[in-house]
Image (cartoon, helix red, strand yellow):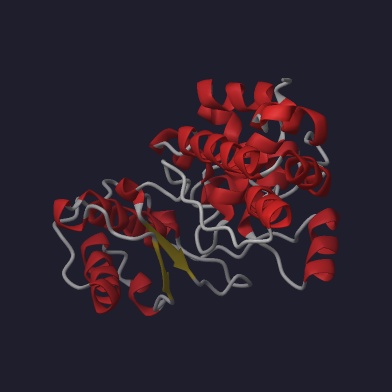
Amino acid sequence: MTPIERGDLWALVAAHGGDHPDYQGMTDELARLGPEAAEGFAEQLAQALHDIDTPAHFAEIRPYTVGDDSYLYARCAVVAAGKRAFDRVVRRPERFGRFVDRDAEPLLAVAPDAYERATGRPWEYTTRVSYEMRSDDWLSIDVEWPIAEGWPLAYDHVVEAVRRALCADPGRRGHEPLVLVLTPDLEPFAERDPARLLELVIRDVSRALGPVPAVELPRDLPEDYFVAEPPPALPAPLVKRVARQGGLKTSSIVAYYRHNPDAPGAGYWAKRLGLR
């Protein structure tokens, strides 16, 4: 029996994956192989997604993906790119960032759809490991800024300090993944006082999550981090994406400047989004 006939994940990806994965072809072949192959495929996929869900991998893609399931879909994109690409990302998490703008969500539906087609029954199978985000980094905080005016970096640094404190709180271990959206008040930035800023962030976060543990403030924030600097004009490819999609994800900005590090505006976004 060949690897494909056993429903082997990497054999099916090799046959139907790559830069432009054929998820329908993958599903068709898996359905033909039967329910056991679909369950085996699901187990291997869950394990692969779990293997690239580490703090090092998350650090490479955060904060570009907060507010949705983009972190999961980027991991799917790594798997869909094939075993060789996957092994590189396992060994070198810094390679993960190049997948941030790829949406491979359909990979998650391959096994369930194939099973249901093969059996006529609903998919109720549960894999031994979960591909959901691990509980030691359960919280994302998305900040809604007026993009036209820009935003002070100091707020982002304080928010990240609060987020880390909450994730490290032993009393919150095993918390379900959560995205908290904050709409900050720009008024306090005239004070340029990190301690005052921390009070305001804790006030806003605690309204949704309750008491916040002790937070270590970021040290020696530069003065210009308290100034809202308007962003430069977007490059033409990103303007076209705004027109096509009706908006622009942060992940799209990240992906563009990772591939075009010398494009106009790269310095501004590198500073704000942690591009390397």
- Give the quarter of the figure containing the C terminus: top right
At 22% from the left and 49% from the top, the residue drawn is 168
Left or right: residue 54 compared with residue 24? left
In the rendered image, the vertical position of residue 42 relative to residue 69, given as above or below: above
Q: Nearer the viewer, residue 187 or 110?
A: 110
Does 222 appear above or below 177? Answer: above
Q: Quadrant of residue 275?
A: top right
Q: Is residue 184 visible?
A: yes
Residue 153 x %, y %? 44, 57
- x%, y% of residue 159? 34, 60
Residue 225 x %, y %: 42, 56
Query: Residue at 26% across / 54% down in the picture?
Result: 174
* Near-viewer residue (108 or 274): 108
On the rendered structure, is 64 left or right of 226?
right
Residue 276: tell me if it is visible. Answer: no
Residue drawn at x 66%, y 51% as measured from the top left: 115
Residue for point 73% across, 56% down: 117
